[in-house]
């Protein structure tokens, strides 16, 4: 899904990439991506649809987006909330949250 974050790309590309989980026998949270303001904001990319104003459908430099590829087991008993904030740039997307991607385990 991260590879789809680039200027000129339609938000449907993120939705399509988010179909990965279900195509491989898992689930995901319905929300795959949303805009950032003081709270979650438009646009919203959901596993079922994209809800955005016409001017938001195509990613443009300066857009701030929260990508949330949150996988869940097919039975819904175990899931992972995972997300990072990106700013769309002329060259692609710059991740602005720099936490580690490695799975953290609490014992």
Image (cartoon, rainbow, N blue to C red):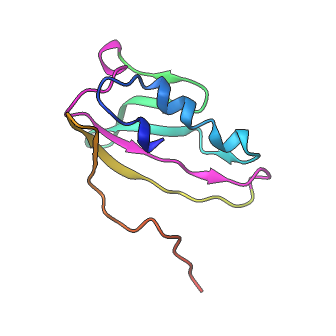
**Residue 38 x %, y %:** 26, 43
From the viewer's perspective, tell me whether residue 5 is left or right of residue 79: left
Magenta: main secondary structure equals loop
Q: Residue furthest front?
A: 91
From the viewer's perspective, tell me whether residue 68 is left or right of residue 43: right
* Magenta-drawn segment: 54-76
Q: Quadrant of residue 55?
A: top left
Front-most of 66 and 90? Answer: 90
Front-most of 94 and 46? Answer: 94
From the viewer's perspective, tell me whether residue 76 is left or right of residue 81: right
In magenta segment, residue 98: no
* Number of marks: 0
Q: Residue furthest right?
A: 75
The C terminus lies in quadrant: bottom right
Q: Residue furthest bottom?
A: 107
Q: Residue at x 35, y 13 (%)?
A: 54
Q: Residue at x 29, y 42 (%)?
A: 93
Q: Residue at x 72, y 39 (%)?
A: 23
Q: Quadrant of residue 65?
A: top left
Work out whether 33 lies above or below 104: above
From the viewer's perspective, tell me whether residue 7 is left or right of residue 57: left
Q: Quadrant of residue 43?
A: top left
Q: Residue at x 52, y 48 (%)?
A: 69
**Residue 33 x %, y %:** 44, 38
Work out whether 84 lies above or below 42: below
Front-most of 20 and 68? Answer: 20
């Amino acid at each position: 899904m991260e590879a789809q974050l680039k200027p000129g790309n339609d938000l449907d590309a993120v939705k399509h990439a988010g179909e990965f989980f279900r195509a491989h026998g898992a689930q995901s949270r319905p929300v795959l991506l949303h805009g950032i303001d003081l709270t979650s904001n438009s646009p919203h990319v959901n596993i079922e649809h994209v809800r955005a104003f016409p001017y938001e459908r195509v990613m443009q430099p300066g857009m701030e987006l929260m990508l949330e590829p949150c996988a869940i087991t097919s039975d819904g008993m175990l899931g992972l909330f995972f997300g990072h904030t990106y700013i769309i740039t002329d060259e692609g997307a710059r991740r602005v949250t720099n936490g580690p991607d490695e799975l953290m385990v609490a014992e």
